[in-house]
Each structure stands twice: as structure tokens, then as C-alpha cells.
Amino acid sequence: MTLPDEQQEKRARIVETMGLLTEAEGMSRIMGRIFGLMLISEDSLSLDDMAAKLGVSKASISTDARRLEHMGFLVRVSRPGDRRDYYELAADFMLRSMRRQVERIRKLRDAMHDAQAGLIAPMRIQKRLRDFEAVFEKGIDSLERDLEAMESGKQPDKKKRHSS
């Protein structure tokens, strides 16, 4: 099925945006582009399919698809009569993504806590570190509440998140 030009352009923007966002986080741009492609793909895709759609080498696709699989964002699937591996988004990729964000924020909070331990500094610097730690703690609490709600099949409560 051939999509209208406007739809192809929108899909290309999604794929490229995911690549840029991933690259900004210090990961491979191709990894983000694979993720973006999988977000908008109806079917599982082989490495050959991904390479053709993204216009990059199969070797690059293979490496980054395996990394996404290892991270829990993609799962490898097979098709009867076909020896190639195919990939699709993991059913819980969004929850996994949020869990990774919580862990990153937790590390930042811990770093702020550790920075305060034994630090001899003016009160305003100590307060700055405590304030950062408190902000990270609120973010963790909010995300964990949302995760619990999503895991139990409920929608996160936006009122609680914004009023804490």
C-alpha cells in the first residue's frame, strides 16, 4: 500500500524526530530511528525491511535492533517458513521506558544526596542541593504512581500528579 505524500512525510518526521531525541540522550541516532519506525509500523519487520525503509546498512540496523531488544523495547518474533528474525515493539515498551526514566531520576536524586554528605559549603549551596534532591524525589513519586496505575490497567490521575 502506497501512502499519500503527506502521510509519508509525517511518518518520516516521526522517525527522524525519534532519532534526534535518542541521539540527544547519548544513544545512537539509528536506534531512535528504528524505534520511531517500529512505532508507526503495523507489522513486524525484518532487519532487511528496516534497513531498506531507513536507508542504512543492515549491519547498523542489526546492532541497534539487538540493543533495543536487550533494553526491552523490541521483541524478536518469527514467521512460519521464514528463517529471518523479525522485530516488533514489546507490548509493555511504554512501561519499560517510564521505568528507565524513574531509574535515571533516582540516580540524579542520589547524586544530589551524596553531594550533600560531608560538604562544607555556604547555606545557599546546601539549600540548592536539598532543593534539587526534593524536586527529583517528587518526580520519582509522581512517575511511580503513574506506573502503578498503568500496570493495574488504570489511567494515571492527572489531578494528583499536578497538585503534589
Image (cartoon, grey):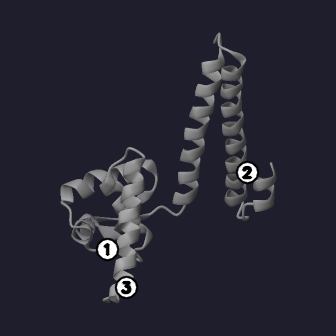
Image spot of residue 45 (x, y percent): 32, 70
Above or below 129: residue 46: below
Q: Residue at x 37, y 57 (%)?
A: 20
Q: Residue at x 30, y 89 (%)?
A: 2
> Label for residue 80?
1
Image spot of residue 125 (x, y percent): 66, 21
> Of the residues under marks 2 and 3, which one precedes in the sequence?
3
* Amino acid at pointer 1: Pro
Helix, strand or loop at mark 3: helix
Helix, strand or loop at mark 2: helix
User: What's the CA distance linking mark 3 and mark 1?
Assistant: 35 Å
Q: Residue at x 66, y 26 (%)?
A: 129
Question: What residue is shown with label 2?
Answer: 145
* Amino acid at pointer 3: Glu
Question: What residue is shown with label 3?
Answer: 6
Image spot of residue 83 (x, y percent): 24, 66
